Structure formats: structure tokens, C-alpha cells
Image (cartoon, grey):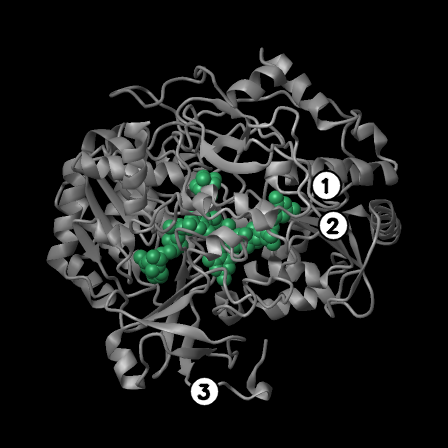
């Protein structure tokens, strides 16, 4: 335990700046216990789970105390995602269970949509209502006009239901609002996307380059731990960020780049590596396609050229390029995760992929490993019907390289238009708060206005539930089974989630909701089991395990059987691209009519008196999902706006003064936000943590606290290659007085 404790403190010193991770546990208060139904068969006990507070999905244990009540959560020592240690959010997950603001019963809307007036309903009545509407939609418009938006584990069950019903429109904002561009960029370069967890071999890297990616505030557990290990082993960290992030504070080089210009820096680095002959020649000759074209392409993109664009000095650009080259192939230009920034994101990430290729890091120790995931057999069911239409029909000849459905695209295609002869008519929204998640809120509201059915399945009364016709309360991850976690990693591993308590109030798991709704839709054949344990037992037995075994061990590790973790030196290796090589020159992108090599284009800049709005994460919160969590609000209960002291002086804004933000389209933040005056941000930008400024009054701790970045993101820079929504082209100015109501648009 001693060594664990030491490491545990170390992670928090990269992350929450030393703030005690154990605080949420100590803070656990009996006053939350009202209504709790424990599983008290064995009193003090531990139950395996994997965390749902973010999508790293760390496996751990939920402990119950002597009364059999949920007490604390810790990591599972054998889990590759957590190495036995949870981040502050994961530890604070207990608060999600004890939050008395939770949704308690099914609700059916009364009156106008969005007026937030509901009546309580039984499950039977609520599901009958939904089934009736779904049947009508299928007859009138075809089942393809229903879409499922889902983020989180329960989506698997609902996805199955929706496909059985006849629609393939299953989408998550974690693609076109998050990692989509990097998946397309890496796929078109290396023939493989990245997935989650990213296969970055950070623990053994000698040089880690972070372009915006703010590990340490972005608390993806394994990465934070590996970065800490790499720093201990003397790795060089280079951070490119207009803000002095936590990662920047651990870096040898901080490059405070002018926002929106990263592609110029990346191209200049490529120039230096090629023209100063510092790239990994052997690797490139053996595996890469298009080197001569690339060389010609970047001929004039010198550090001096990039200096004028990025404000990063030429000698720093050269020095950092040489640092990377010296570490080759144990170097990682991190692809980042939330990469939908400026609309040319696929091309920026292509430049990141090309740099990694020139440095020979793909498939190499200390670079990118070749991940493997465990394949669990699928529980048998009849074939799904073939839909007449898919989401692609709404965008003929567009976004062909997008591998997943585009959430914002479905939203757009819900608003009737003369250009289309059909539009979406029904949404099921599970575990995603679209009002705070999709940019351009007015479009989301217009789409919702055009719907004949909106079902929201959530644990909390979030903004999206306020607009639903029917709200269904899901129980939290601590009160339910879900599908076995079988994520990729260095070796294949599976993890079980099981309940540690009975669901509070009248909440139910998604597997149950999908099955019962399926029955009411006459789809019984797709749900040939009485409960989820049967499905899990069937799957586990097929791979030589059992529920009984998994309940004891939580995670099970298997041997690799798809080849080595790395590409051996000199090994012949065929990449899954049209040329079978790493495509420095991307033929797939060229086939779609776009530049096969990334080209820098300048983006609009703020007018006088306006500042670029950038946003990111705080170590103790996940998006909007934790901002009401009683344990985590204790650590941070509102966001603040970071402003450079020069700017603050000019505006006569004091530290901690509450102000309002107004964007380029005249939208004013609904609530005031505290100013944080700090040298840690460039003068041309302001920064806020995403997930605050909640407008739903039922969130007793989060309502009205801080500002919502989403509300201020009304200008979207669309990625023409894959439909991602670039969200960092918005500019704000400051209002020191509360604006008159008529000025406030939403
Ligand atoms: N403005 C702005 N927009 C963004 C981002 C940003 O930084 N700024 N980030 C983007 C990124 S990277 C991503 S990945 C997306 C994420 O966006 P979302 O997927 O929408 O994530 P959350 O905001 O956490 O919303 C999750 C919802 O799930 C509910 N929930 C939590 N647990 C459960 C559960 O067990 N069951 C059910 N049914 N519901 C549950 C929560 O109460 C909440 O309403 O947002 C994107 N959009
Ligand atoms: N604690 C916590 N951790 C999380 C999450 C969470 O909600 N909470 N969410 C998870 C999810 S889904 C995702 S996708 C990831 C997102 O995490 P990352 O992929 O690390 O996020 P980024 O989009 O890189 O955005 C944040 C950083 O970009 C910087 N930035 C802004 N504009 C520019 C620019 O023009 N150039 C450069 N170089 N930098 C810029 C900001 O200052 C900030 O430091 O985090 C994950 N981890
Ligand atoms: S990183 Fe933290 S919040 Fe995310 S799954 Fe792991 S413990 Fe949970
Ligand atoms: Mo994300």
C-alpha cells in the first residue's frame, strides 16, 4: 500500500496541483443516505465496476460499509487503464449515486416543449407512450427517421433496440465534436485510427510533444500516470498551448503559440526535419509513400515563415525539432483527443501524423504501440432489417471519410429543408446533454422544435431533459450491470461492472429499458433473455470465464494473439492504406477532392476589444456531467474566465470580479463569471473550463454557476473532410454590468 500511496500523491501533483484525491471520500456524508436501498446480503463487501465518470473507463471496486451502504470506490490493481488508482473524478463518483437531485421516476411532458413542466408516470405508461409514437413514426416516415444520440455504456443496449427497429442512425458527439478529425487523419496516413485509450507508449517515451492536449487537466488516468513516469525517467516534454497549462509547467519547452496557427508550426517542424536531414531515413525509406512530394510541399515553410504566423521564434522551432529527432523513434507527437478546433482539423492532424511518420514513432517503443482488444462473441439475435436510408443520404457526396455518424449532421438534417425530401422526426437521447454539447445552440433548439418525439434518458435533470416529451431515469453505474468492457490496450483485457446497491427511487438500467421498450414494439425476438446476467454469463462462458469468476477478480487479462506490440526493426509491414505504406501523401484524401498534403490557411482574428474564446477541462470535473456532483462541487463549484493582466488593466477588471461575456454575434452569457487574472494566458485569448453555467433550476448546486462556453459558440468552422465542428473561432468581449434582459439572446 505504501508505494501505491506515494504514486497516488504524484499523480495528483501533475493533476489537481496537489489537491488531495481522497477528499471526496472523506467528504461523503450520511445526509445523502435518504432513500438508499443497499444490497446488504453480505454487508461490508466490494463489487467490481468500471467508472462511468469519463470514457477512460477505469476498472475498480465499489466498497460497501458495515451497513451494506455504498462507501467508496478504488482502482483495481490489475486494470491497465487505472493501475489501481482512480482520478479525483472517479473517486468522487460516489457523489453521483448520493445526489438527491437525481431523476427519480419517468416523466411525461405537460404543455409546451421546453417549458419544463412534467407529470410523473409509471414505467409502463411512459414506455407505452414512447412505443406508440415510435410505431407511428415508422409508419408515417419510416424507422430510418429515428436517431439515437448516446454517449456511455448503456448505448450498446439502446443501439441494439434502434437497429432492430430499423434505423442505423446511432451517433455520439464524441466523434464530430471531439476526436473524429484525428481518426480520419491517422487512418488516411497509417491505415489505422487511434481509438481509446490512445495507443501512445508514453511511459517509455523520450520526448512527448503536446499540441494543446492538456494532460494533467485532461485527467485521462493512464496517460497522466505514464506522463508522470516518463518525466521521472527524464523525458523531454514540449507543450504548445496559448495557455500555460499544467502540462506546460512540467515541460522543458512551452511554446505559447498564437491560437489557430498550429498547422504552420507543424509544417515548419516537418521542413526542419527534412531539410536538416534529421528525419528517420531508414524508417521513411522502408515504410513511407510520397516523401519527395512532401519535401517539395514544405520547401518554403521555413521556421522564419512560421515565426510570422505563430509568434514562435525560429531558433525555438529548430531546437524543438532537433529534440524530437534526437529521441526518434521513442517520440510522440500526441494526437490530442478533442481536436475539433478550427475546421481544418483533419489537415492539422494529418501534419501531426506525418511528423510521427518522419520520426519513425508509429509501431515503436516509446512511440505508438499496436493495440489489441479482446473480442467477445455477440449474444445471438435475428438479423437487423436493412434500412432504406442512412445518415449519409442527408449529405450526398460529403464526409465519405467519416467512419462514424455525425451528431451535428443528424441535428442539421432534423430541420426540414428544401434541399432534402425528408428529415429526422424522432430522437432518443441517452447520456449526452446535447444542449451543452453541440455548438450553435439555436440549431439544436430548432431541430428539437421539429421533432415528433424526443425521449431523454439520463440520471440527472440536465438541460436536454427539459426539452423531452418523455424523460426516463437511468440508475447510476454503481447500481447496474452493463456490457463487459473490452477496450484496446497493450494486451487484451476485459472488465465487469456489477451493481453495489439497488437502484435508488424508480430508476432502471438501460439494458432493462431497451428490452421492455423492445417488447412493446413487438421486437421480443431480439431480446431472448430475462436479464442481463444471462447474456454476460453466455459471453463469458464462451471465452472460458464466468460471472462468478469475474465478480471475484473484476478484470481478466489475456495474451495477445494478433502479433507483436511493436514493429521489429527491418520487419516487412503492410499498412492498411491503398499503397500499403504510410501515406505522407494521402491518396484517400486526394480521391475525395481535398489537398493530399496539409496546407496552411489563415483563420479570422478577433476585432478590437474582442478575445478568442478557448476552453478545456478541469481535473475534478467531466464536461457538464459532474457539475452538480456533491463531492466534486466541493472541489470546484464554478468556472472562471482567465484574462491576461494587460487586458484586465485596460478594462479595469479586478481579480474575482464577476463579469458577463458577450460574443461576436451579440450572445451574452446567461450568468456572470468570475475573472481570473493571470499571466498564464496570452493577451489575445480568454479561457474557461467547459461544463458550467447550467440553466436547469433542478440542479441545486450547479444552476447559475459560471458561464457556458457552448452558449457562446455560435460560429462553427466545419471540417469539409469529415464534418467535424470547429468551435474555437468565437470571440468574446466583457460586460461589467448585468446586461438588460432584451439584449440577451440564447
Ligand atoms: N462547448 C463545448 N462543447 C463540447 C466540448 C467542449 O469542450 N466545449 N467537448 C466535446 C467533447 S470532447 C465531447 S466528448 C462531448 C461530450 O458531451 P456529452 O457526451 O454530452 O457529455 P456530458 O456533457 O458529460 O453529458 C453527459 C450526460 O449524460 C448524463 N449521464 C451521466 N451518467 C449517465 C448514465 O450512467 N446514464 C445516462 N443515461 N446518462 C448519464 C449526464 O447527466 C449528462 O446529461 O462534448 C463535446 N462538446
Ligand atoms: N478532467 C477531465 N479530463 C477529461 C475530460 C473531462 O471532461 N474532464 N474529458 C475527456 C475528453 S472526452 C476529451 S476529448 C479530452 C480533451 O482533452 P485534450 O484533447 O487534451 O483537449 P484540447 O482540445 O487539446 O483542449 C484543451 C487545450 O487546448 C488549448 N488550446 C486552445 N486553443 C489552442 C490552439 O489554437 N492551439 C493550441 N496548441 N492549443 C490550444 C487550451 O488552452 C487547452 O489547454 O479530455 C478528456 N479528459
Ligand atoms: S480517468 Fe477518472 S473519471 Fe475517467 S474513468 Fe478513470 S477514474 Fe473514472
Ligand atoms: Mo471528447
Mark 1 or mark 3: whose residue is earlier in sequence: 1
* 161 over 16 or under it: above or below: above
Query: Which corner quadrant of the image does residue 586 belong to?
Result: top left
Earlier-in-chain disc, 2 versus 1? 2
Q: Are marks 2 and 1 in contact (CB under 8 Å)?
A: yes
Q: Which residue is mark 2?
A: 472
Residue located beneath label 3 in the image = 737
- Quarter of the rendering occupied by the C terminus: bottom right
The spot of residue 251 in percent (x, y) is: 20, 49
Q: Nearer the viewer, residue 607 or 484?
A: 484
Q: Of helix, strand and loop, which one carries label 2? A: strand
In the rendered image, which residue does mark 1 sit on? 508
Q: Give the Cα separation between the discs numbered 1 and 3.
A: 45 Å
Q: Nearer the viewer, residue 414 or 544?
A: 544
Confirm or reject: label 1 Cβ below 8 Å from ligand 1.
no
Residue drawn at (28%, 53%) of the image:
246
- Looking at the rendered image, the quarter that the N terminus falls into is top left
Q: Residue furthest top?
A: 544
Q: Quadrant of residue 536?
A: top right
Q: In the image, residue 426 lies at what x, y percent? A: 76, 54
Please tell me whether residue 329 is drawn above or below residue 166 in the rendered image: above
Left-right relation of 116 to 401: right
Instruction: Name the quadrant containing residue 306.
Output: bottom left
Mark found first going from the N terminus, 2 or 3:
2
**Side (left or right) of 592 relative to 302:** right
How many numbered circles are shown?
A: 3
Q: Is residue 265 placed above or below 658 in the rendered structure?
A: above
Q: Nearer the viewer, residue 592 or 483?
A: 483
| Residue at left offset 65%, top offset 41% | 155
| Horizontal relation, residue 35 to residue 494: left or right | right
Mark-to-mark CA distance, 2 and 3: 40 Å
Amino acid at each position: 500500500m505504501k508505494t501505491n500511496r506515494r504514486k497516488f500523491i504524484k499523480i495528483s501533483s501533475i493533476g489537481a496541483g496537489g489537491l488531495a484525491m481522497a477528499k471526496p471520500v472523506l467528504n461523503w456524508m450520511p445526509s445523502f443516505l435518504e432513500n438508499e436501498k443497499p444490497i446488504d446480503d453480505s454487508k461490508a463487501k466490494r463489487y467490481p465496476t468500471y467508472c462511468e465518470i469519463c470514457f477512460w473507463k477505469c476498472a475498480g471496486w465499489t466498497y460497501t460499509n458495515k451497513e451494506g451502504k455504498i462507501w467508496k470506490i478504488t482502482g483495481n490493481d490489475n486494470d491497465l487503464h487505472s493501475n489501481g488508482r482512480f482520478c479525483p473524478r472517479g473517486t468522487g463518483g460516489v457523489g453521483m449515486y448520493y445526489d438527491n437531485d437525481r431523476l427519480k421516476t419517468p416523466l411525461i411532458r405537460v404543455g409546451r416543449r421546453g417549458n419544463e413542466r412534467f407529470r410523473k408516470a409509471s414505467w409502463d405508461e411512459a414506455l407505452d407512450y414512447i412505443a406508440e409514437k415510435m410505431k407511428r413514426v415508422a409508419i408515417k416516415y419510416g424507422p430510418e427517421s429515428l436517431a439515437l444520440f448516446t454517449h456511455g455504456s448503456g448505448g450498446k443496449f439502446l443501439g441494439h433496440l434502434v437497429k432492430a427497429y430499423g434505423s442505423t442512425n446511432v451517433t455520439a458527439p464524441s466523434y464530430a465534436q471531439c476526436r473524429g478529425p484525428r481518426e480520419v487523419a491517422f487512418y488516411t496516413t497509417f491505415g489505422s485510427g487511434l481509438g481509446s485509450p490512445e495507443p501512445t507508449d508514453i511511459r517509455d517515451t523520450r520526448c512527448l510533444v503536446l499540441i494543446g492536449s492538456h494532460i494533467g487537466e485532461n485527467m485521462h488516468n493512464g496517460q497522466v500516470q505514464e506522463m508522470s513516469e516518463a518525466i521521472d525517467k527524464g523525458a523531454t516534454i514540449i507543450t504548445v498551448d496559448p495557455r500555460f497549462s499544467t502540462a506546460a509547467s512540467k515541460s522543458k519547452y512551452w511554446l505559447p503559440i498564437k491560437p489557430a496557427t498550429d498547422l504552420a508550426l507543424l509544417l515548419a517542424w516537418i521542413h526542419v526535419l527534412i531539410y536538416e536531414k534529421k528525419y528517420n531515413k531508414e524508417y521513411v525509406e522502408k515504410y513511407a509513400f510520397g516523401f519527395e512530394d512532401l519535401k517539395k510541399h514544405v520547401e518554403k515553410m521555413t521556421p522564419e515563415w512560421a515565426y510570422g504566423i505563430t509568434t514562435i521564434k525560429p531558433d525555438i522551432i529548430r531546437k524543438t525539432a532537433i529534440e524530437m529527432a534526437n529521441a526518434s523513434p521513442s517520440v510522440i507527437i500526441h494526437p490530442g483527443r478533442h481536436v475539433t478546433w478550427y475546421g481544418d482539423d483533419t489537415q492539422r492532424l494529418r501534419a501531426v501524423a506525418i511528423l510521427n511518420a518522419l520520426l519513425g514513432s508509429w509501431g515503436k517503443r516509446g512511440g505508438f504501440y499496436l493495440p489489441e482488444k479482446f473480442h467477445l462473441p455477440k449474444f445471438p439475435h435475428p438479423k437487423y432489417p436493412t434500412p432504406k436510408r442512412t445518415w449519409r443520404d442527408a449529405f450526398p457526396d460529403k464526409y465519405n471519410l467519416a467512419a462514424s455518424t455525425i451528431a451535428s449532421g443528424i441535428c442539421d438534417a432534423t430541420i426540414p429543408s428544401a434541399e432534402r425530401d425528408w428529415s429526422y422526426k424522432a430522437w432518443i437521447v441517452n447520456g449526452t446533454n446535447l444542449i451543452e454539447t453541440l455548438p450553435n445552440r439555436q440549431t439544436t433548439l430548432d431541430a428539437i422544435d421539429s421533432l415528433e418525439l424526443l425521449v431523454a434518458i439520463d440520471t440527472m435533470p440536465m438541460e436536454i431533459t427539459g426539452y423531452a416529451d418523455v424523460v426516463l431515469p437511468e440508475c447510476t453505474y454503481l447500481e447496474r450491470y452493463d456490457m463487459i468492457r473490452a477496450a484496446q490496450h497493450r494486451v487484451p483485457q476485459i472488465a465487469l461492472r456489477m451493481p453495489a446497491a439497488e437502484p435508488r427511487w424508480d430508476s432502471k438500467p438501460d439494458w432493462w429499458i431497451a428490452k421492455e421498450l423492445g417488447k412493446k414494439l413487438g421486437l421480443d425476438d431480439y431480446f431472448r433473455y430475462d436479464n442481463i446476467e444471462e447474456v454476460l454469463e453466455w459471453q463469458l462462458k464462451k471465452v472460458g470465464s464466468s460471472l462468478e469468476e469475474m465478480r471475484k477478480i473484476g478484470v481478466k487479462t489475456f495474451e495477445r494473439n494478433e502479433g507483436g506490440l511493436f514493429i521489429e526493426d527491418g520487419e516487412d509491414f503492410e499498412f492498411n492504406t491503398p499503397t500499403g505504406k504510410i501515406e505522407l501523401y494521402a491518396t484517400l484524401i486526394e480521391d475525395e477532392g481535398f489537398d493530399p498534403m496539409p496546407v496552411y490557411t489563415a483563420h479570422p482574428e478577433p476585432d478590437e476589444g474582442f478575445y478568442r474564446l478557448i476552453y478545456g477541462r478541469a481535473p475534478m470535473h467531466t464536461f457538464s456531467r459532474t457539475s452538480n456532483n456533491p463531492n466534486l462541487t466541493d472541489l470546484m463549484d464554478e468556472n472562471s474566465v482567465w484574462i491576461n493582466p494587460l487586458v484586465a488593466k485596460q478594462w479595469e477588471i479586478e481579480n474575482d470580479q464577476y463579469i458577463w461575456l458577450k460574443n461576436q454575434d451579440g450572445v451574452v452569457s446567461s450568468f456572470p463569471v468570475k475573472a481570473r487574472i493571470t499571466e498564464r494566458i496570452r493577451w489575445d485569448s480568454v479561457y474557461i473550463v467547459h461544463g458550467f453555467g447550467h440553466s436547469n433550476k433542478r440542479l441545486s448546486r450547479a444552476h447559475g454557476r459560471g458561464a457556458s462556453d457552448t452558449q457562446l459558440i455560435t460560429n462553427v468552422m466545419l471540417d469539409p473532410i469529415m464534418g467535424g465542428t470547429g468551435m474555437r473561432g468565437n470571440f468574446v468581449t466583457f460586460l461589467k454590468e448585468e446586461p438588460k434582459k432584451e439584449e440577451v439572446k440564447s
